Image (cartoon, rainbow, N blue to C red):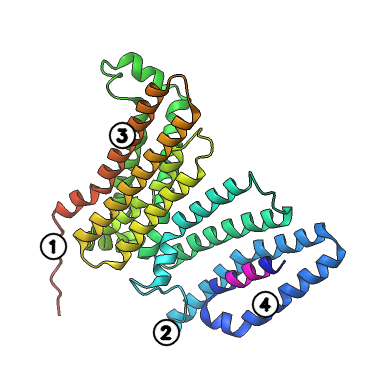
């Protein structure tokens, strides 16, 4: 149970600094007392207390940050722990959370095959994972979409692309495509997943340009074109899931591929030159795809399939194709950088 209490203490770090310094110890003490009392009543009561306390934290954290933000507007001073300094370790941790949390979840699923965790620990872990991820997402939205939040938008773009692709599949447009198109064999219908993602990128740019509330994001993307590449970098974890779909014992290679992505993102955040940042993201992508391809090759060879050569070539080609599409999508901001900029209106006295 010390583990759960430690996790709760870690989650308290998500509160604003001023609130945490004033109430943090009290909240921790109350939680520990509640858990100790519940333990005396049984495991079911303990699970209920832990569930109630952890699920209530995201709402409380968001509420306190919004209150802190209102205070900032009135006083002009900020004491929020989430005003990350660019290049700081805290910014890197927040930005790389989608990659690191995905890696932890993959490894947790792998270990669950060989070690049966107590039910309360599994429930607490899942609640912790989604509470932290959802809390950081809401905080990034409330903070005006800072740099560390951009990979989260990439995750949303990927989900939207998957939904769009599934809608096309539900209407059997894939069958229509192969029957009506004279070059259906040369252009796989699955490539519409990537085309949909590209269209969503341009839709995001259009919305950020036309909607006044999101216009600051558009100007930031124009001022530093690598920010859009970093946003699109957040699409890769879900694409890795697509690469390893239907594999068995793929988790170590999946986790290692995610680690390569996290390293690429970390070096991106620590660098100040745009071109070098872009190259670092491409290197992170390349290392991740190479790790995925090597892992798939090992798993296929280990399976001793009767159609070994065909399966190996087909799967490696699919990984290579995914790599090419992702590298192309990460390069889209280069085109944005070449677009003409709107001339600023001269200021009048």
Quarter that holds the C terminus:
bottom left
> Residue 321 shows which numbered tag?
3
Residue marked by disc 2 = 77
Mark 3 or mark 1, earlier in chain: 3
- Which x, y percent locates residue 67? 53, 75
Mark 4 or mark 3, earlier in chain: 4
Residue marked by disc 1 = 343
Type of secondary structure dominating the magenta stretch: helix
Residue for point 82% across, 70% down: 37
- Assess whether mark 2 and mark 4 are in contact (beta carbons under 8 angstroms): no
The alpha-carbon separation of the residues under discs 2 and 1 comes to 33 Å
Mark 2 or mark 1, earlier in chain: 2
> Is 90 on the left-hand or right-hand side of 118?
left
> In the rendered structure, which segment of residues is drawn in magenta?
5-10
Residue for point 32% across, 65% down: 269
Residue for point 67% across, 49% down: 115
């Amino acid at each position: 149970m010390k583990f759960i209490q430690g996790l709760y203490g870690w989650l308290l770090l998500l509160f604003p600094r001023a609130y945490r310094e004033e109430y943090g110890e009290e909240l921790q003490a109350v939680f520990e007392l509640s858990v100790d009392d519940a333990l005396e009543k049984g495991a079911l009561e303990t699970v209920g207390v832990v569930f109630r306390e952890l699920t209530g934290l995201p709402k409380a954290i968001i509420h306190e940050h919004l209150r802190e933000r209102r205070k900032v507007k009135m006083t002009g001073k900020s004491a929020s722990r989430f005003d990350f300094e660019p290049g700081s370790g805290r910014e890197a941790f927040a930005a790389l959370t989608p990659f690191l949390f995905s890696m932890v979840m993959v490894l947790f699923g792998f270990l669950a095959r060989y070690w049966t965790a107590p039910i309360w620990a599994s429930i607490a872990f899942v609640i912790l994972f989604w509470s932290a991820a959802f809390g950081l997402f809401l905080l990034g939205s409330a903070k005006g979409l800072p740099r560390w939040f951009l990979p989260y938008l990439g995750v949303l773009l990927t989900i939207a692309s998957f939904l769009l692709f599934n809608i096309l599949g539900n209407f059997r447009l894939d069958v229509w495509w192969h029957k009506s198109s004279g070059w259906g064999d040369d252009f796989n219908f699955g490539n519409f997943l990537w085309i949909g993602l590209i269209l969503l990128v341009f839709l995001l740019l259009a919305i950020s340009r036309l909607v006044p509330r999101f216009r600051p994001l558009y100007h930031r993307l124009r001022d530093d074109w690598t920010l859009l590449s970093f946003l699109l970098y957040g699409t890769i974890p879900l694409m890795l899931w697509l690469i390893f779909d239907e594999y068995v014992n793929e988790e170590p290679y999946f986790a290692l591929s995610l680690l390569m992505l996290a390293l690429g993102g970390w070096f991106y955040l620590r660098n100040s030159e745009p071109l070098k940042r872009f190259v670092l993201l491409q290197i992170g992508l390349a290392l991740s795809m190479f790790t995925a391809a090597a892992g798939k090759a090992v798993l296929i060879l280990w399976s001793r399939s009767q159609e070994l050569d065909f399966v190996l070539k087909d799967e490696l080609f699919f990984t290579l194709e995914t790599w090419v599409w992702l590298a192309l999508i990460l390069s889209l901001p280069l085109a944005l950088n070449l677009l003409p900029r709107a001339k600023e209106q001269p200021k009048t006295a």
